[in-house]
Image (tube, grey):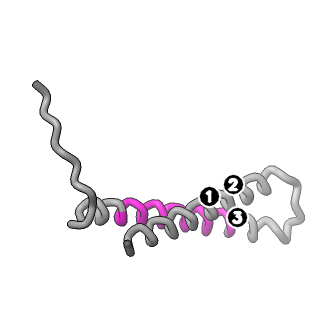
Amino acid sequence: MKTKTALKVAVVIGVLALVGAGYCFWLMTVPLSYDWVPVVLIGFVVATGVFVISLITSFIVLIRFRRSPSSPKFPQTRST
């Protein structure tokens, strides 16, 4: 049960980071004051980094979930 919660949290954080990165990317196309340019660039880099970390975390949790003994066992199908 702990892995399902961790997976949900990682997915929510990843989605929010992706939305934040998209917003910062959109702000790069809008004429801004020079004071805001570093803020937008740093925000884009941080949001992209958080998304990548969330993606890696999701893969690790999925692998652990599939290897856990409590995961549902599916019968192996053999081709004839």
* Left or right of 25, for residue 33: right
Give SS at disc 3.
helix
Please name the residue that numbered disc 2 is placed on: 22
Indicate whether residue 55 is drawn in magenta: yes
Q: Residue at x 23, y 62 (%)?
A: 67
Picture coordinates of residue 48 (x, y %)?
Answer: 58, 61
Looking at the rendered structure, the kind of residue marked 1 is Leu
Picture coordinates of residue 17 (x, y %)?
Answer: 62, 63
Q: What secondary structure do most residues of the magenta stretch adopt?
A: helix
Give the residues in magenta. 43-61
Give SS at disc 2.
helix
Dot 1: few (<14), some (14–19), or many (≥20) neighbours within 10 Å?
some
Front residue of 18/6: it is 6
Q: Residue at x 16, y 42 (%)?
A: 76
* Left or right of 46, for residue 77: left
Dot 3: few (<14), some (14–19), or many (≥20) neighbours within 10 Å?
some
Comparing marks 2 and 3, which lies closer to the viewer? 2
Quadrant in which the C terminus appears: top left
Front residue of 35/48: it is 48
Q: How far separated are the C-alphas under marks 2 and 3? A: 12 Å
Looking at the rendered structure, the kind of residue marked 2 is Gly
Please name the residue that numbered disc 3 is placed on: 41
Q: Are marks 2 and 3 in contact (CB under 8 Å)?
A: no
Looking at the rendered structure, the kind of residue marked 3 is Leu
Please name the residue that numbered disc 1 is placed on: 18
* Left or right of 23, for residue 67: left
Dot 2: few (<14), some (14–19), or many (≥20) neighbours within 10 Å?
some
Q: Are marks 2 and 1 in contact (CB under 8 Å)?
A: yes
